Amino acid sequence: MNVHEYQAKELLQKFGVATTRGKVASTPEEAEQVARELGDVAGPDSGGQLLQPSGATSEKDTKRRSWATQPVHTTGCPPGAKRVDLVVKAQIHAGGRGKGTFTNGFKGGVHLCKSPAEAREIAAKMLGQTLVTHQTGPAGRVVNKVLVAKSAEIAREIYFAILLDRATAAPLIVASTEGGVEIEAVAAKSPEKIIREQIDPLAGLQSFQTRKLAKQLGFDSSQLKEAPKLFDGLYRTFIACDCSMLEVNPLVVTPNGTVLALDAKFNFDDNALYRHPEIAAMRDIAEEDPREVEASKHGLNYIGLDGNIACLVNGAGLAMATMDIIKFYGGSPANFLDVGGGATEEQVTEAFKILIADKNVKAILVNIFGGIMRCDVIAQGIINAVKTVHLPVPLVVRLEGTNLAAGKKLIAESGLAVIAADDLADAARKAVAAANPK
Ligand code: GDP
Ligand code: MN
């Protein structure tokens, strides 16, 4: 599961990780209100460390800001009104927002501004609009919420991520002084700029490691307390929330040396979500594939793909093999659907409904191995499900395993237009042919 940046920052703050202060808004008026509140808490004498004094901007900062700033409107800010440095950020489950473009032509999902009225104007241009970034694909994502936050002044942008390294089965910190930009490009062009620090899962992140990282990331001796403290907070968040990935890009150093997380992206281990009802409650279904949402309601593992052969399979390994062999015979899978080892007839029925709801689907391939479940039971389930659902596309069925003969007999005598297959290769060939009639 993923969460929005504003939710990720709420979690980080719980673990004492410094971020900018801000709040989410769903309407332009709310955005203005939040901006006003942010202005009020950090008046000139509040000493709020996250509100940076304006001015004293280096040339590099100005350059960095130029694309994020876009048109910095001064309209709506009456003379003498309190001016604050704010940022309005589109909230979608995808990165690359800063360099993204809305389909209405508005450029940038991250905008700096100076007044509550401006925050409202920018929010109005983002909310309800579709933002396309290099991570959303051409269809883009509709922005339903924006984060309005204090803007931080940036001296340096660092990349910092913690993930599970499958090779060592342990957490791994991946960091770089080249933050802000796409880390994939840094890894490809200058791999020596990627720092890796493996963590012993039992001992946890040690202080010698956080100090080493701080030095490698160019922090000077005055920051050798603050930076390690932040890394430590990120690691504690990663472990306590059962994350599979926690990425902060950028982690920024302000001109006065404050270190904070300016962006945050989390991936949670879905199998551990039951331990975190407060995180599970952050799920935003509007950001997910509706087919996957429906499938998860019925306990089905479904992942939508863009081909035209729907697969209904028991077991993830078998699902992978099925997709491979479809590709091998020149076809393209429309999905990955694993009904699991003990699927009920209701689940199989729901699975068929989800498959045929996908307008791209031109044929369905059922590939079941009757191990614990017997083939005759499965066959009866398929027959009943198909009778309820009325399939609009050809159905190829391949069964193997316990009570195979009885299963095949049931299907043959069912009177349904099922294309029976003898083995996996036969099934794939028949499914590809059925999906692409001459
Ligand atoms: P992403 O493009 O989706 O990864 O969104 P980010 O939150 O990482 O923002 C993109 C870029 O916008 C960052 O790398 C920063 O350079 C800039 N940016 C984001 N927030 C702020 C802010 O509060 N102040 C300033 N000055 N720049 C910001
Ligand atoms: Mn980012």
Image: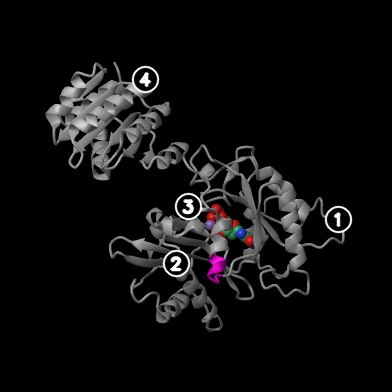
Q: Which residue is mark 1?
A: 78
Provide the residue span drawn in magenta: 12-17
**Image quadrant where residue 186 sits:** bottom left
Camera-near label (2 vs 1) is 2
Instruction: Examine the structure image and report whether residue 319 is included in the region drawn in magenta.
Output: no
Q: Disc 4 versus disc 3: distance between alpha carbons?
A: 34 Å
Residue labelled 2 has its Cβ within 8 Å of some atom of ligand 2: no
Hey, what amino acid is under mark 4? Pro
Local packing at callout 1 (Cα closer than 10 Å; few below 14, some 14-19, many 20+) is few
Q: Which residue is mark 2?
A: 240
Earlier sequence position, callout 3 versus callout 2: 3
Local packing at callout 3 (Cα closer than 10 Å; few below 14, some 14-19, many 20+) is many
Q: Which residue is mark 3?
A: 2
Q: Secondary structure at mark 4?
A: loop
Q: Quick one: 72 or 296, which is closer to the camera?
A: 296
Earlier sequence position, callout 2 versus callout 4: 2
Q: Please give the name of the residue rendered at 22% of the width and 35% of the height, measured from the top-left corner.
A: 368
Whether residue 175 is visible here, answered yes or no, is no
Q: Please give the name of the residue rendered at 72% of the width and 51% of the height, measured from the top-left corner.
A: 30
Q: Disc 3 versus disc 2: distance between alpha carbons?
A: 16 Å
Q: Which residue is mark 4?
A: 392
